[in-house]
Image: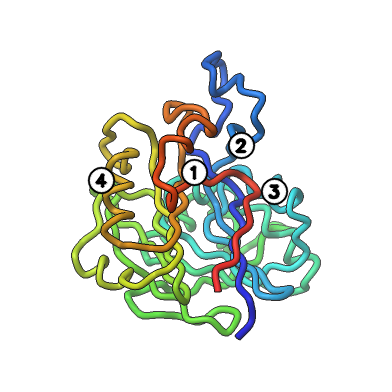
Amino acid sequence: MSQLTATFLGTGTSQGIPVIACNCGVCKSDDFRDNRLRTSLMISKGSKNIVIDTGPDFRQQMLRESVSQLEAVVFTHEHKDHTSGMDDIRAFNYSSKKAMQVFATAEVQNSLRREFHYVFSADKYPGVPEVNLNAITNDAFELMGESIMPIDVLHFRLPVKAFRIRDFGYVTDANFIPEESFEKLKGVKWLVLNALRKQPHVSHFNLDEAIQVANRIGAEKTWLTHISHMMGKHGEVTAELPSNIELAFDGLKVDIG
């Protein structure tokens, strides 16, 4: 079975870090791990790659990681910090000479059609992105020869899709996981989980809540993502965490089976 690698393209919340016009210690930190682009993840298998969410930093992330081949884009939900970079997939259209496979729920597809209306126009402007929309339901789908299981979570009242690939679970933008979704995450060895800050938040797990969820799922290793500048400095927060839980950082690569 071929090796899978997860690359954290971005680990920041919707404003990223540093935040515009902020002079806090985190935003002014000289630790590269405190510089966070908007949250996105890449799964690689050999020369093949898929990306989960194309936020506003998608172009920068692809250039930083020297990505020359992209099989598909998978969306968790429709918020702009997870979708607004979709226009830049046209570079892959040019290089591959084919449309990009895009996987999204019906609700996310509707949002993409509104936000990127020119992509789906009957009379397209030359050079716009070419995409093939594929529906995400509750059934597993296949990419790169791997089964990808959608998992329902809630981002306050907004439905979001988490995903399981082999024994790797990815849960971003959530503050509630239903019981049936915990069952789908049962037995994962590697887990990525959102943790916005230490204080409570209406639509994200805070640090304590994320630790509780991670302990319940029981993965061998958990990385926290979707982090705001209110969390604190990477080095200081990491020192406070259990040994099997870490803050992720941009560019981190981990083997996931």
- Residue 175 appears at what percent x and percent y? 28, 47
The residues bearing labels 2 and 3 have C-alpha atoms spaced at a distance of 20 Å
Q: How is the image coloured?
A: rainbow
Q: Is residue 184 above or below residue 27?
A: below
247 or 122, nearer to the observer: 247
Is there a contact, CB below 8 Å, between mark 2 and mark 1? yes
Please tell me which of labels 1 and 3 falls first in the chain: 3
Quarter holding the N terminus? bottom right
Please tell me which of labels 2 and 1 falls first in the chain: 2
The residues bearing labels 2 and 1 have C-alpha atoms spaced at a distance of 9 Å
Q: Which residue is mark 2?
A: 33
Rendered image quadrant of residue 18: top right
Horizontal placement of 104 versus 210: left or right?
right
Please tell me which of labels 4 and 1 falls first in the chain: 4
Residue 247 got which mark? 1
Q: Which residue is mark 4?
A: 156
Please tell me which of labels 2 and 4 falls first in the chain: 2
**Of the two numbered discs 4 and 1 in the rendering, the one whose residue sits closer to the viewer:** 1
Q: Which residue is mark 3?
A: 59
What's the residue type where badge 4 is placed? Answer: Phe
The residues bearing labels 4 and 1 have C-alpha atoms spaced at a distance of 23 Å
The residues bearing labels 3 and 4 have C-alpha atoms spaced at a distance of 29 Å
Q: Is residue 20 above or below residue 242?
A: above
Question: Helix or strand or loop: what does disc 2 sit on?
Answer: helix
Quarter holding the C terminus? bottom right
- Residue 212 appears at what percent x and percent y? 27, 49
Please tell me which of labels 3 and 4 falls first in the chain: 3
